[in-house]
Amino acid sequence: MEVKTSLLDNMIGVGDMVLLEPLSEDSFIENLRKRFDHNEIYTYIGSVVISMNPYRSLPIFTPEKVEEYRNRNFYELSPHIYALADEAYRSLRDQDKDQCILITGESGAGKTEASKLVMSYVAAVCGKGQEVNKVKEQLLQSNPVLEAFGNAKTVRNDNSSRFGKYMDIEFDFKGDPLGGVISNYLLEKSRVVKQPRGERNFHVFYQLLSGASDDTLKKLKLDRDFSKYNYLSLDSAVVNGLDDAANFRTVRNAMQIVGFMEDEVQSVLELVAAVLKLGDIEFKPESRCNGTDESRIKDKNGEFDRRQTEMCELLGIEQSVLERAFSYRTVEARLEKVSTTLNVAQAYYARDALAKNLYSRLFSWLVTRINESIKVTRHKVMGVLDIYGFEIFEDNSFEQFIINYCNEKLQQIFIELTLREEQEEYVREGIEWTNIEYFNNAIICDLIENHQNGILAMLDEECLRPGTVTDETFLDKLNTICAEHQHFESRLSKNSKFLTDHSLPHNCFRIQHYAGKVLYRAEGFVDKNNDLLYRDLSQAMYKANHSLIKQLFPEGNPAKVNLKRPPTAGFQFRASVGTLMKNLQTKNPNYIRCIKPNDKKASHIFTDSLVCHQVRYLGLMENVRVRRAGYAFRQAYEPCLERYKMLCKRTWPHWRGPAREGVEVLMADLPVPAEEFSYGRSKIFIRNPRTLFFLEERRRQCLQDLATLIQKIYRGWKCRSHFLLLKKSQIVVAAWYRRYAQEKKYQKIKSATTVVQSYTRGWQVRREYRKFFRANAGKKIYDFTIQRIMQKYFLGLKSTMPSVSPIDKSWPANPYRFLDGVHTELRRIFHLWRCKKYRSQFTEEKKAVYEEKLEASEIFKDKKALYPSSVSQPFKGDYLEISKNPKYQKLHSAVDEKVLLADVVNKINRANGKGTARIFLLTKKSVVLADQKTGQVKASVPLPDLASVSVSTQSDGFFALRLKEVTSVKGDFLLSSDHLIEIITKLHRTGATAADSEQLDIDISDEFLLQFKHDKVCVKFIQGAPKNGNSVSCKRKNNRLLEVSVPTTA
Ligand SMILES: Nc1ncnc2c1ncn2[C@@H]1O[C@H](COP(=O)(O)OP(=O)(O)O)[C@@H](O)[C@H]1O
Ligand SMILES: [Mg+2]
């Protein structure tokens, strides 16, 4: 999108002086100063550009700047010379309007630089292409050539143009440059022979001497040493910052680009050399016979000869011809020819005149030659005028007069054209024209150029007048004719008005130019106007065998002798200025007014008085007034609407209708009086700068608000989009991270699963296949074998089982040693089992019998020899069947207790040992002895009275019942029975079961004591020889011993 900007943006001071408020000289200068201090060297007055010389390079002439200003409207950007160049170029290209760019200002104000900037801008923006580029180069390169020959160092400017230059650049219909025409005005040729203090001759002399090769110098017969040449001032031959040698190469190169042939360049350099050498010719007086002095060329120790010869060789002139030309002067009047000798002064005058003419003609030839190169048929033209500005020196002479005249003319045309333009614009826009008052300098121009009584006309008249003509006669003439003119002053004219002015010397006159009063010294006016070159000299030059010299002095051709005097310098100048003015009037003017800020060529210094002076004589204040007379500011409707549309709700942000209506709506909406505006056809005119500033201020405020709004929205947007981006990124990052994390986790789980799986599978497989493992085979086989062995063992055992009789002692042999424990255990179990089985067959009675048997065994086994024989005898108990046998009825009833045992025993008589049968009854409570036949109870012993029972170890049936001592009356009983074992056992059992009785002691020994009545008798059992068969014999041996002999059993 195109950015619409304006000159009014970021202004330092005001960019256009028309907007200056209040307008005064002080504020004007203050504005310039302010802008200058901020490096703003350009300021507008409407379409006029004021340019301050910065005296240093600023970064505002770059290709980027060119691009910036290209195709932009004049007021769109801050003031710049490029804006003016662009405007001029575009109206030339697009509207077919010839343009001229008028650059004025005093010496050193930057005119030449400005003209170069304009040309370089146009060169940069116009079309490109081989042909076009060549033309551009030629046009641009004409500058260094002309500057070398026409510029010099002065006190004001190190590169001061000493000629006026007007260059028409010609373009084709597309705006591409085709070529150009250069006009030069009044070269300051006096500089060739003499330079003021601190200044130097034209650059080319120094450039040639320092830059040319030795070879070239030799050809030109020159010496590198400046001091050898009279015409070169020495005090400032070397200028700081000027590299003459390098510039010489630039000039040579430029000449080549412009189209000079090698031999032409050579000829030009030869002429330059000749001028230098001419300065070294000196004269001496030589008295003649007629008494007059005649000048002769001085011969310095033969030096002259060499120089003169060299110069003549250079120019191809015969020495004698030259010598004669410097000695004689031929005056031709009608058909008469009078030859007079020249004195030394005249000879020097002639020499200098020749040098000046030679040089200035060479310069003009150069211009013509360049024109030849760049000449084309006319199309569109842009003229660039770089002419010396107004000059007011302490000592002003003919040159200043001419120059200032030229500036008067330019001012005149400026006023005319500015006003005309203004007027035309008003008409064009349909705005009512209000008359503008301004100072018209036509009256001054008239004072100078009037054909009858103008100063120039009178000077010419004086010069042409026969008789003695001096500067004084000229001044007299002025005094008589111009005395009444209000812009002319001299001592005499003042005196006539009875005014004395001591600042006005006698030989001077003063003209009040539009830019200030200038005092001219009349001295030299006549001579300079005459610009006399003796004909002998031009003829001598014409005779030269050098094509260029011949061309430069055509009047020396004897075939074309012209008795008429050549036109005077003043006349020529007036004519060329006239042509120039005519030329300019046909074109659209563009002004660049150059101002120099100080006299020191220094950057950053702004001298108020100096600037003020320039502002005055350039008529800039007038310029502003003219411009402001009607309306201070104007702007086309479109840009105006574009710029201010935000000031009104109806036009913001878009106005749909025509721009003009929009502007009208806009202005009506603002609190500005209606007379402040005029609506033209395409532009709005604003009368007062204040109104514009008001608009600007409102706009600035609006823009601030809008900027805040935009900022706000932008920031919001930026933050939002940043946030969204972050969020998006975060999601992406998170997604990737999650994916990564899950992937990792999954991998971990997967590998873990695989491990678990593999273990499980391994375990499963191992489990499945364990049986097939060799390692397990041993155990298997072992188990199996063991099983088989056990099976065999058990089966074997089954078949070889012993009988179930508990007394059977047999048990199969153990076939396997390792089963020893089992075998023994099984035997034990088996035995227990068969015993139990055997026992389970027993009845209660039988069980009791066996219990008794068992008890008997416990008591007697291995203690009494009788015992084994008792084992097989059943314990019948009631052998006598007491209850059934009526015999014992009585006895039975006497006992009235259940009889546990009833048997017949032998009661051993204590006295002799003879036995008597007795019935032995055992009940639960007592032991009863009864008579066998009668059944009469003989003794009853309650069981508790029994102390113990004694028996022998032998196989006899004797037993003694020993009573407790208290109860024993008769003493203990010694009895014998076949059923001894049964009796004792039952007795023991009964005693044991009686609740209140103690265990009955059973004493088994072969010797024991018995209490018989009062005696204690020892019963002793001995082994006796069998006497009465196997019966036991008992004998009372003494009262203390009863011996029982028991037969030994085999
Ligand atoms: N725009 C500029 N930028 C920088 N320096 C400048 C500018 N214009 C002029 N000058 C300086 O001022 C000097 C004099 O300028 P010049 O154009 O020769 O003055 P004039 O032609 O008016 O006598 C130049 O040599 C240069 O140093
Ligand atoms: Mg200049």
Image (cartoon, grey):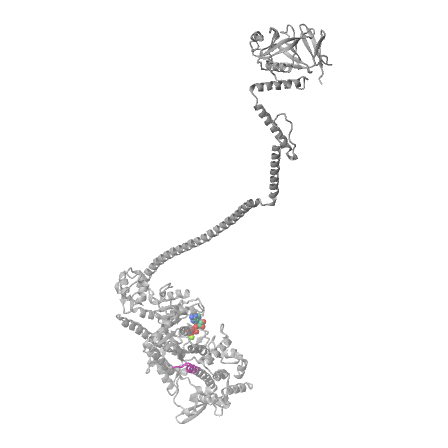
In the image, taking residue 254 as reference, residue 909 lies left or right, namely right
Q: Which residues are magenta?
A: 366-376
Question: Looking at this view, is 395 or 255 the one in front?
Answer: 255
Residue at the extreme bottom of the image, as rendered: 335
Question: Looking at this view, is 949 or 831 the one in front?
Answer: 831
In the image, taking residue 306 as reference, residue 587 lies left or right, namely left
**Quarter-wise, where is residue 811 in the image?**
top right
Q: Is residue 506 visible?
A: no
**Residue 475, image x, y percentages:** 37, 81
**Residue 316, image x, y percentages:** 50, 88
Q: Residue at x 61, y 44 (%)?
A: 775
Using the image, determine if residue 188 lies above or below residue 655: below
**Residue 170, image x, y percentages:** 38, 78
Q: Is residue 646 visible?
A: yes
**Quadrant assignment for the C terminus:** top right
**Residue 14, image x, y percentages:** 36, 65
**Quadrant assignment for the N terminus:** bottom left
Identify the main secondary structure in magenta.
Answer: helix
